[in-house]
């Protein structure tokens, strides 16, 4: 017979026969090398080979008998052959197997010219032709024959003009897209993979390396796709619209039944993208990262990551055996965000992002917004959704309605959670820590950084997982359980937060997408000179958003009551730890980092606006003007305030510890070190910190800094603590110092709790200091004069601040009602009986409310047990005076009787 012309028809046939022949996609004897304009999907690059089985033949007979119209959209009426990959394939063992094309003979016998069956049947030129008059379809014999759904339409009542069929196209992925998917550089894999309407039906394209076969299942229709090599599978189904479908992906020993990840619209909304692009997404963690969710009625996980310099991004994890090939993400516009919804993937799975850098190389990165991580030294991110049910509603309500921190009692116990009780988890800590802190009377705990960090020796100050509590102690919900327990015990939770720098680990943030991204592009601005880390680029809106949202995240998601911001000074100054020539002045010629100023102002304003009752605290070691001033109030330097609620008073800490380290005989030469803090005490809202930094690296523990023998060391420590609690400002004490631990703190073993073991001979000495700390907190809480006017100069008056020869300091504190408390410290190792002090004449009698020399604290018990009445004799510039006995190396508090 004469070979068909390019149109697919035989020129020797009648017009009627030509019309019938158009229903056949391609003649069985078509030559493989001959270009055919209207080839059915069986093309070398793509379409699956098709066999019409018994069910298909029965369907044709039903049409012949006058069955109702059946469209491709009524999938339940289409009885295509379903063959499971690797299990139900028909293998032809006869060498001359015939391929069958269901042709129009049956319909022609019914008097209908319109074609009802179109099937691809060509494989090789040697295959025998099958005549159009055949009425039965024999079984397929090709080894790799695949079933595609048969499109069936009922014939009209009368003959109608035959319309030429739509020219089918190859469903296979073209070469360019194929290369980009294989090289992980495709920005829009969803535009290629999945189901797409094309001339002739719907093209299905799947990329699953290592799969033996892929079958599309929609309703009762099952169609095995053509294996195009390199993990690509495709097929053209004669459907009018894209159906709801699933994929059966056959591997060597299993068949995976799954939704197609490339059948879904973006799971990230336009508003989210707009806010990310503007750098104003205040709940960024809800938009980026791994979010378990139900999308378009299907459960799975949405993966999103910001990587604007990447040429391609794919997600790898335990759910795909760490092979990201088939999980390419799509780029969502100009925001630099990449997204992929993966159906069937849920909580607990490990994952990372494989990023193709601009130079074509690849890097595997942890998720910058991962909410859970592996236990270090492992570095994978973990899909997480919280299930904790909070029980601290009463606490949050009181916090929101309470006075600001600088006008409220605020004494802080600083803790390094991994070493407070080594080996305890978050939940185990929740059984012990709240009770211990409540017993001591502290109002708050401050947790050294809990965000994930790779090196335990950094104590958490080199963060890689800014949105994940460290997995060393448990899950994020376990950490919430601890915070909840502290709140229910009436204890606030502060957390150290480190937005100043991050480490250079090649699986974390450093050059995240192949170029500088989170760090500054200028090497002089990016490298931190002291710690070998990288500084954030605060001038980039997306980076600033990452950090601002992170501050909000801890307060909103974990109910943190305050953030102590680490290393603020290193952020504020361009020349911080840099020599001349190593830094570039700002646009005004100054040394201030204007980008960091803007960031800190935005962070504070956002946190205070969104989370009622929280406090932010700056660890800032310089005299920067306006650290705790409102952001909209301009200072003399032309800057608005940074907006913090409190600031660590590093000057007081250094000066007072330096004074206490001197032998008492030399202290008169350093008297000003204890009084100088009152020169600037009201320039900011201060915290007086005795933190972890002062009891490590050869600085000795607090009691060991004190001079003299063991008795004198403890006496000095007790006197110093009471002076600190009476001084204007809030108090912070690091763990272990509350019971006079003699050794420096070590993160490896934590506090020396054995010192409080009753079996230890000197246990009473350590327990006495701890009892004093408890009493300091109790009296402090019940004495508003010690905290209500901490930031108001009218709340403080010196009685005597220049008694250097005596080593004596005496001052009054006043509450809002004018009720005073008198604090007197004698930091000489001698008793001073009948020591006269000026006093106000409106207080008729005074009573000792605390004495650090009391026997129960381990002192000599030199006290003033009786009421002390003032004399009319003026002293220290006051109309009246008191005569009190001052114990050696002690502080005494007197209140109106």
Image (cartoon, helix red, strand yellow):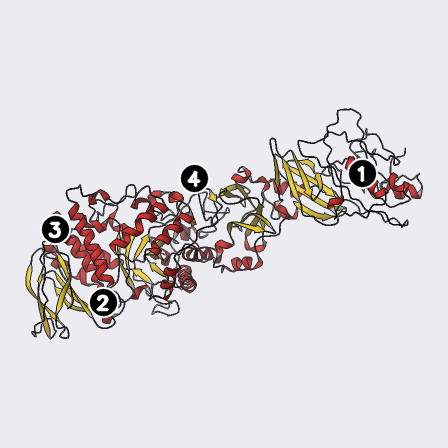
State the residue in front, 333 or 425.
425
Check disc 2 and report its element: helix, strand or loop.
Answer: helix
Give the alpha-carbon distance from disc 4 to disc 3, as whole Å: 48 Å
CB atoms at circles 2 and 3 under 8 Å apart? Answer: no
Give the alpha-carbon distance from disc 2 to disc 4, as whole Å: 51 Å
Q: Of tags 2 and 1, which is closer to the observer?
A: 1
| Spot occupied by residue 370 in the image (x, y as percentages of width and height) | 47, 48
Check disc 3 and report its element: helix, strand or loop.
Answer: helix
Give the alpha-carbon distance from disc 2 to disc 1, as whole Å: 95 Å
Q: Of tags 2 and 4, which is closer to the observer?
A: 2
Q: Of tags 2 and 3, which is closer to the observer?
A: 2
Give the alpha-carbon distance from disc 2 to disc 3, as whole Å: 29 Å
Q: Residues within 10 Å of mark 3 (few under 14, many from 20)?
A: some
| Spot occupied by residue 233 in the image (x, y as percentages of width and height) | 67, 38
Q: Of tags 3 and 1, which is closer to the observer?
A: 1
Q: Earlier in the sequence, mark 2 or mark 4?
A: 4
Which residue does the image show at 40% across and 62% down from the upper left? 604
Q: Earlier in the sequence, mark 3 or mark 1?
A: 1
Residue tagged 3: 712
State the residue in front, 204 or 428.
428
Side of 612 relative to 249 (left or right): left
Q: As displayed, is residue 348 above or below residue 726? A: above
Residue tagged 2: 785
Quadrant in which the N terminus appears: top right
CB atoms at circles 3 and 1 under 8 Å apart? Answer: no
| Spot occupied by residue 704 in the image (x, y as percentages of width and height) | 18, 48
Side of 4 relative to 720 (left or right): right
Residue tagged 4: 378
Residue tagged 1: 58
């Amino acid at each position: 017979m004469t070979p068909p012309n390019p149109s697919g028809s035989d020129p020797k046939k009648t017009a009627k026969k030509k019309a019938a022949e158009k229903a056949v996609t391609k003649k069985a004897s078509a030559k493989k090398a001959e270009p055919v304009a209207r080839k059915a999907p069986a093309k070398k690059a793509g379409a699956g080979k098709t066999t019409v089985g018994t069910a298909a033949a029965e369907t044709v007979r039903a049409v012949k008998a006058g069955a109702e119209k059946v469209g491709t959209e009524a999938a339940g009426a289409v009885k295509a052959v379903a063959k499971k990959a690797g299990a139900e394939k028909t293998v032809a063992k006869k060498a001359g197997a015939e391929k069958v094309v269901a042709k129009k003979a049956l319909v022609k016998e019914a008097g209908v010219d319109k074609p009802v069956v179109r099937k691809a049947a060509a494989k090789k030129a040697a295959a025998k032709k099958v005549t159009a008059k055949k009425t039965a379809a024999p079984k397929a014999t090709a080894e790799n024959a695949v079933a595609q759904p048969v499109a069936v339409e009922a014939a009209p009542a009368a003959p109608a003009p035959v319309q030429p069929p739509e020219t089918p196209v190859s469903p296979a992925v073209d070469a360019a897209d194929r290369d980009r998917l294989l090289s992980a550089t495709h920005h829009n894999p969803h535009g290629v993979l999945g189901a797409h309407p094309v001339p002739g039906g719907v093209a299905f394209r799947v990329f699953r390396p290592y799969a033996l076969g892929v079958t599309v299942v929609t309703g009762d229709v099952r169609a095995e796709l053509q294996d195009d090599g390199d993990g690509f599978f495709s097929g053209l189904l004669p459907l009018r619209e894209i159906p709801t479908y699933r994929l059966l992906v056959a591997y060597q020993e299993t068949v995976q039944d799954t939704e197609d990840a490339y059948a879904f619209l973006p799971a990230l909304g336009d508003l989210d993208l707009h806010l990310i692009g503007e750098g104003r997404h205040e709940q960024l963690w809800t938009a980026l990262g791994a979010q378990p969710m139900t999308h378009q009625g299907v459960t799975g996980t949405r993966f999103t990551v910001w990587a604007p310099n990447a040429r391609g991004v794919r997600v790898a994890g335990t759910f795909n055996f760490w092979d990201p090939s088939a999980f390419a993400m799509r780029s969502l516009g100009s925001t630099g965000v990449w997204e992929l919804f993966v159906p069937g993937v849920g909580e607990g799975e490990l994952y990372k992002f494989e990023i193709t850098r601009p130079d074509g190389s690849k890097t595997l990165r942890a998720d910058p917004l991962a909410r859970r991580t592996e236990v270090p030294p492992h570095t994978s991110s973990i899909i997480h959704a919280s299930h904790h049910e909070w029980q601290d509603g009463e606490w949050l309500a009181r916090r929101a309605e309470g006075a600001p921190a600088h006008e409220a009692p605020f004494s802080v116990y600083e803790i390094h959670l991994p070493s407070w009780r080594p080996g305890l988890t978050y939940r185990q800590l929740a059984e012990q820590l709240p009770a211990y802190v409540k017993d001591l009377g502290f109002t708050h705990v401050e947790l050294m950084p809990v965000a994930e960090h790779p090196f335990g020796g950094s104590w958490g100050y080199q963060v890689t997982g800014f949105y994940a509590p460290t997995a060393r102690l448990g899950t994020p919900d376990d950490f919430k359980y601890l915070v909840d327990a502290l709140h229910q015990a009436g204890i606030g939770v502060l957390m150290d937060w480190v937005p100043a720098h991050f480490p250079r680990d090649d699986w974390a943030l450093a050059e995240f997408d192949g170029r500088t991204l989170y760090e500054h592009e200028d090497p002089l601005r990016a490298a931190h000179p002291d710690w070998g880390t990288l500084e954030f680029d605060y001038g980039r809106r997306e980076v600033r958003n990452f950090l601002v949202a992170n501050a909000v995240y801890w307060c909103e998601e974990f109910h943190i009551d305050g953030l102590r911001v680490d290393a603020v000074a290193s952020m504020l100054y361009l020349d911080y730890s840099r020599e001349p020539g190593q830094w570039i002045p700002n646009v005004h010629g100054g040394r201030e980092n204007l980008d960091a100023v803007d960031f800190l102002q935005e962070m504070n304003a956002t946190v205070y606006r969104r989370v009622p009752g929280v406090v932010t605290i700056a660890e800032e070691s310089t005299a920067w003007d306006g650290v705790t001033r409102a952001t909209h109030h301009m200072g003399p330097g032309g800057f608005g305030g940074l907006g913090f609620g409190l600031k660590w008073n590093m000057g007081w800490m250094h000066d007072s510890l330096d004074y206490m380290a001197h032998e008492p005989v030399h202290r008169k030469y350093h008297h000003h070190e204890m009084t100088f803090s009152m020169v600037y005490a009201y320039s900011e809202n201060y915290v007086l910190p005795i933190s972890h930094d002062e009891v490590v690296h050869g600085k000795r523990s607090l009691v060991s800094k004190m001079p003299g023998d063991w008795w004198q060391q403890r006496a000095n420590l007790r006197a110093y603590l009471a002076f600190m609690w009476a001084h204007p400002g809030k108090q912070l004490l690091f763990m272990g110092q509350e019971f006079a631990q003699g050794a420096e703190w070590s993160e490896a073993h934590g506090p020396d709790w054995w010192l409080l073991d009753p079996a230890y001979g000197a246990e009473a000495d350590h327990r006495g200091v701890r009892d004093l700390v408890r009493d300091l907190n109790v009296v402090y809480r019940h004495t508003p004069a010690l905290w209500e006017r901490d930031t108001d100069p009218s709340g403080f008056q010196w009685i005597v601040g220049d008694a250097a020869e005596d080593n004596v300091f005496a001052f009054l504190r006043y509450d809002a009602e004018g009720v005073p408390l008198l604090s007197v410290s004698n930091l000489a190792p001698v008793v001073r009986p009948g020591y006269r002090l000026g006093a106000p004449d409106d207080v008729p009698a005074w009573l000792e409310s605390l004495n650090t020399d009391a026997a129960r604290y381990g002192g000599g018990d030199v006290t003033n047990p009786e009421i002390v009445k003032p004399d009319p004799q003026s002293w220290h510039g006051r109309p009246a005076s008191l005569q009190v006995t001052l114990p050696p190396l002690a502080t005494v508090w007197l209140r109106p009787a």
